[in-house]
Amino acid sequence: MSSEKLATLLAEGAIERVKEDRKAADLNLGSAESHLRSAEAVAADDSEGAFVLAYDAMRKAILAHMQANGFRVSARPGAHYRTGLYALSALDERGIDEHLAAFDDLRRLRNKSEYKAVRVEETDVAEAVVHARAILDAVKVDLS
Amino acid sequence: MRTAAPQLLPIFRSDGQGRLLARVYLGNDRPASLAELSRELGLDDGGITREADRLERAGLMRSERVGRSRILYPNEESPYYPELYGLLLKGFGPATVIGPELGRIDGIERAFLFGSWAARYLGDSGRDPADIDVIAVGRPSQLAVVRVERALSERLGREVNVTVVAPEEWDAAASGFLRQVREGPLVAVQFVPDGEQA
């Protein structure tokens, strides 16, 4: 974990210090696992739904990492974007930079599919699942 | 600034000179200092200063001092301004930069600039438009499109929005939006730079 990068995010007000909450972290890790399984199960029938599940699996895995380490994103617009910034800083030593960078692409596509009538394809879901799995596994290793 | 002549438009002294002119002319809404331009364009400080001096002496650019910074602007009073603007737009502008990136995505058959940037290419004068609107015809991975949007937005310093349309929808102009796009200004995006074989 790069404490220097996290210190910058704290100084910029992107994230805040809170009490560590391992119980909440474990709950979020559990729901990230379920979301990821569900995403794979419904991908063929409902690519939009599966994509949102895979995205949320990724987001909750990062959230779990924050909770276990005593951080949260500040409560103003752009919280999901800052969740991605946290992940890039906190998980930068796990060798999953490509997957972490993809989180922001998934976030943007999720917004587009919600507001701009963009159809998410099954190939997008397949890619999202790969990224989510990599991030979830890295968070689990980091918290073990 | 000993960069090679620009491939697409080899009439400038160097690619660096072309890109400096393009950044100053096409990014007039985001004026920048010499130091910022040198960082942004990856050109060395000494070279960019000499180039700016040369272009200013020729009356193609002007600069203003703000504290210790020298901010560069296009000289809109120059008799060459309209034509030079057009050359830079075609040689270094969005359609040129966007093409190769979009061309790398599987499943995109054709792409067009539409909206205000397209109007600009077709000679409409006025304020430089902010967002760059692109229609991509095909069935690409949406994540690949989002990734390219992000890279292009960073590179061009403007929001690039790519709307994907299935070929049959495009051909049939299947919605009010598509009819409007097709009737408005359109500039085809070249996937392969001029002079290269597809």
Image: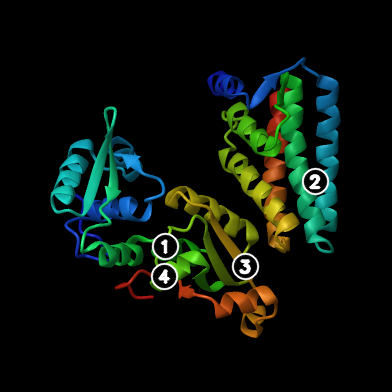
Query: Is label 1 or label 3 in front?
Result: 1
> How far is disc 3 from disc 2 in space, using C-alphas?
27 Å
Question: Which residue is at 64% across, 76% downward?
Answer: B178
Which residue is painted at 46% across and 70% down in the image? B119
SS for dot 3: strand
The answer to whether marks 1 and 3 mark residues whose Cβ atoms lie closer than 8 Å is: no
Instruction: Give the crowd class for mark 1: few <14, some 14-19, many >=20 residues within 10 Å.
Output: few
Q: Which residue, given by chain and number where applicable, does mark 2 sit on?
A: A36
Q: Of residues B177 and A107, which is closer to you in this image? A: B177
Q: Nearer the viewer, mark 3 or mark 4?
A: 4
Is label 4 in contact with label 2 (beta carbons under 8 Å)?
A: no
Query: Of tags 4 and 2, which is closer to the observer?
Result: 4
Classed neighbour count for the residue bearing mark 4: other residues with Cα under 10 Å, few (<14), some (14–19), many (≥20): few
Q: Secondary structure at mark 1?
A: loop
**Marks 1/3: CA–CA distance:** 28 Å
Q: List the residue tagged with mark 3.
A: B164
Question: Which mark's residue is nearer the viewer, 2 or 1?
Answer: 1
Residue B170: image location, x then y, percent? 62, 79
Q: CA distance from mark 4 to mark 1?
A: 7 Å
Q: Which residue has dot 1 on it?
A: B126
Identity, as a three-letter code, of the amino acid under mark 2: Leu
Q: Could you say where residue A63 lies in the image, as x and y percent from the top left? A: 75, 31
The residue nearer to you, when weighing B175 against A2, is B175
Say which chain tag 2 marks: A
